[in-house]
Image (cartoon, rainbow, N blue to C red):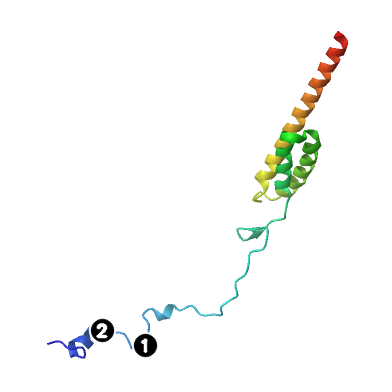
Amino acid sequence: MNMVGDESDSMFWETGEAVGVMPGAENVITGEVQSPQQIPLGATHFAMFPQTNAILALVLSIASFACGGLILSIPALFVALSAKKITDGIPTHPDRGIANAAYIAAIVNIVLSVLIILLYAATIVAYMSAG
């Protein structure tokens, strides 16, 4: 009959290593525990990038299509140009694509607004000369 304190039971749990030594103890990492550090605003992939107003420029550019025309697209162009000036110097800047999109959208809206104004002016001139 096998009892709990039997000789064969104690042989089962024994290992060839010394008692109290954890296997692989030579690979222990030592040092102090450091306090967790927060990632500062504007940090992406462990690199700090200067802040831009690229999102503001894109919002102004899109809003100028809906209701602003030249009133919103000209400020959007200036804000996009300032964002592009910052992001063009750093090819890996995360706002680079947004700044380019805002710049292109602002220019397209300025061109469309000027064409519409010229079309209205031509229509008014044609109407006045016909009557």
One can see residue 103 in this view = no
Look at the image and tell me whether residue 23 can be seen.
yes
Label 2 to label 1: alpha-carbon separation: 14 Å
Mark 1 burial class by Cα count in 10 Å: few <14, some 14-19, many 20+: few
- At which x and y percent is residue 46? 62, 61
Locate residue 17: give its quadrant.
bottom left
Give the residue drawn at x 77%, y 39%. 77
Q: Residue at x 84, y 17 (%)?
A: 124
What type is the residue that disc 1 sits on?
Answer: Gly
The 10 Å Cα crowd at callout 2, few under 14, some 14 to 19, many 20 or more, is few
Can you tell which quarter of the image residue 79 is in? top right
Name the front one of labels 2 and 1: 2
Q: Position of residue 123 (x, y in %)?
A: 81, 16
Q: Amino acid at mark 2?
A: Trp
Residue assigned mark 2? 13
| Residue 96 x, y percent position in the rendering | 67, 46
* Rendered residue at 67%/44% (across/down): 98
Residue 20 horizontal side relative to residue 65, left or right: left
Q: Nearer the viewer, residue 84 or 40?
A: 40
**Which residue appears farthest toward the front when viewing the image?**
131
